[in-house]
Amino acid sequence: MPRLRVIILDATAEDSDTYNIVLWADVPAGRASWYAKTGAVSAWKDATATDNTAIANGSVAESLTVQRVPKGSGQPARQQFLQDLWTGWQTFVTNNNPWQRYGSTWDGTTWTNTNNP
């Protein structure tokens, strides 16, 4: 489980309502190897060694995104907006498995199918 879920990095120079954001999602255990990237570190400069290890070993998926929050919304509305953005990211990581059939083969006669979790 990631230590944090949403990290606001900064507002863009062009629009103070548009932010560079990092989202961290928990990766289902059976898929960590697909997200693993040896030596990977967070886009957030204040990530801890533990955070970076989780990103590198694939147990946490990081998304760096630019997001415009509703103009003129107050802090609570902005925070809810970003929480909803994170919920969508976590749902995607949990439910999207493009590797389910990775490694399935056909030798010309017989199919060997995989079912990666």
Image: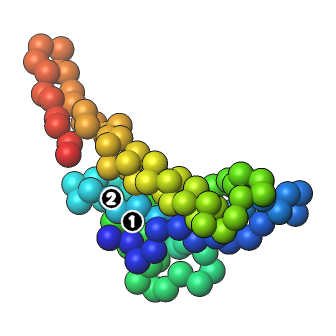
Q: Is residue 9 visible?
A: yes
Where disc 2 sits, the SS reads loop
Q: Mark 1 points at which residue?
A: 60
The alpha-carbon separation of the residues under discs 2 and 1 comes to 5 Å
Q: Is residue 22 visible?
A: no
Q: What's the amino acid at mark 1?
A: Val
Residue at figure coordinates x 58%, y 56% from the top left: 81
Task: Identify the mark nearer the N-term, 2 or 1.
Answer: 2
User: Is 112 or 6 nearer to us in this picture?
Assistant: 6
User: Is 77 or 16 nearer to us in this picture?
Assistant: 77
Crowding near pointer 2: few (<14 within 10 Å), some, many (20+)?
Answer: many
* Residue 27 numbered tag: 2
Asked if 53 appears above or below 83 in the picture, the reply is below
User: Is 38 or 87 nearer to us in this picture?
Assistant: 87
Can you tell which quarter of the image residue 78 is in? Answer: bottom right
Residue at figure coordinates x 50%, y 60% from the top left: 83
Residue at figure coordinates x 18%, y 14% from the top left: 108
In the figure, is residue 75 to the left or right of 83? right
The percent coordinates of residue 70 (x first, y second) are 71, 52
Q: In which quarter of the image is the N terminus?
A: bottom left
Crowding near pointer 1: few (<14 within 10 Å), some, many (20+)?
Answer: many
Contact between marks 2 and 1 (CB within 8 A): the answer is yes
Q: What's the amino acid at mark 2?
A: Val
Can you tell which quarter of the image residue 92 is in? Answer: top left
